[in-house]
Image: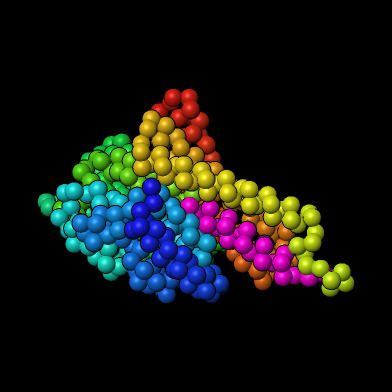
Amino acid sequence: MMTPSSANCITRAEAARDLLSKHAPQVDHDAAWPTDSMAALSEASLLGLTVPTSYGGAGQGPRVFAAVVSRLAEGCASTAMIYLMHSCATQVIVAAQGFPRRDQILKDIAAGRHISTLAFSEKGSRSHFWAPVSQATANGAMHRISADKSWVTSAGHSDSYVVSSRSVNATEPTASTLYYVAKGAPGMTVVGRWTGLGLRGNASAPMRLENVSVASSDRLTADGDGFGAMVNVVLPWFQLGSAAVAAGICRSAVNGVRDHLSAARLEQMGQTLASLPNLRADLARMQILTDSQVAFLDYVAGKMEDPRPDTMLAVLESKAAATETALQVTDLAMRACGGTAFSGRLSVERNFRDARAGSVMAPTTEVLHDFIGKAVLGMPLF
């Protein structure tokens, strides 16, 4: 049920969306981390959306989170992805009951003073983010981490990083531990610049950790419990948030096509492109696909808020369904807008490129299809 507090969070997200949309073209063009847009989210008190109210956060659950992320993605998908990764990292910190700095960091996040992110994927294990090849070593109360992280959203911009590494003395690839590593930690560097096809403003660059010293008290999980946190804490929120980003991209594409068909004219006929039934049909298909995913997104969020035996199946389906739908919707958008879209003069061209990221982002659509098939067959996922 939507409460006044929940409705207020969504209203603030809608206001932020309008500001994000103004910055989105330049962010995309320059492949620049969206400083102004992230400041707007801080000022709108959205960074602490899922932080418990006892720490000053809004204490919102999956439904409001999905609604907020989708609206932000309508304005700027790069900013929405940064926000999603921040929220996933925040959930790890929320769950880290034994982390001594937990309370203060959550208060800082709720106050809009702290942005976090995940540093999971590694060059050696690629999209299998749950199986790091790096391995921590111990020296008394200090742990040392050396790792090549291949994709770190907000690399160099976040105030903290939730870093995964195989546990000290572990022999199994899933026996991992999650650590809290602050920005500027000696030995942690950004080793590339993100200039991807889409989501060009999210600074998803590689980072290298060379003998980074982390106090054992800065573990966010017990030794060997990192895999459980990745699967049970991070994966559901990431899946839902990724689906919400895709839904927001779809909405933006529908709006972009609608505006183009209403404004562009066939001068010789004295009509707009909206007079052409084939283009109206394309817009209709886009609308139906988008509405279907928005409805499914709410269904999955409801499953997360009231877990049932089939909740994980729905969670696995959410990203695969939404990101593949975004490919269809944005392809239709490009076709409907024709050469004007191809020239890059319309926002639908940015939507088209941004949508391509979702299906190849770990876990990829192909990996998710395998997981879903295993789940339906009653087989273990890992």
- Position of 188 with respect to 342 (left or right) is left
Q: Is residue 246 magenta?
A: yes
Judging depth in this view, the residue of 320 and 365 nearest the camera is: 320
- The stretch of residues the image draws in magenta is 244-266
Q: Is residue 321 above or below residue 353?
A: above
Counting from the top left corner in percent of width and height, residue 242 is at: 47, 51
Which image quadrant is residue 304 in?
Answer: top left
Residue drawn at x 74%, y 52% as measured from the top left: 281
Counting from the top left corner in percent of width and height, residue 185 is at: 25, 65
- Position of 65 with respect to 197 (left or right) is left
Residue drawn at x 40%, y 28% as measured from the top left: 380
Counting from the top left corner in percent of width and height, residue 88 is at: 35, 53
Judging depth in this view, the residue of 271 and 235 nearest the camera is: 271
Asked whether residue 284 appears in the rendered view, the answer is yes
Q: Is residue 312 magenta?
A: no
Q: Outermost residue, right direction?
A: 268
Quadrant for the C terminus in the image: top left
Which image quadrant is residue 223 in?
Answer: top left
- What's the image's color scheme? rainbow
Q: Outermost residue, top direction?
A: 378
Asked whether residue 199 appears in the rendered view, the answer is no
For the image, the number of numbered tags is 0
Residue drawn at x 41%, y 65% as measured from the top left: 12
Judging depth in this view, the residue of 297 and 238 nearest the camera is: 297
Counting from the top left corner in percent of width and height, residue 53 is at: 24, 57
Q: Is residue 163 above or below residue 203?
A: above
Residue drawn at x 35%, y 63% as measured from the top left: 46
Q: Which SS type dominates the magenta stretch?
A: helix
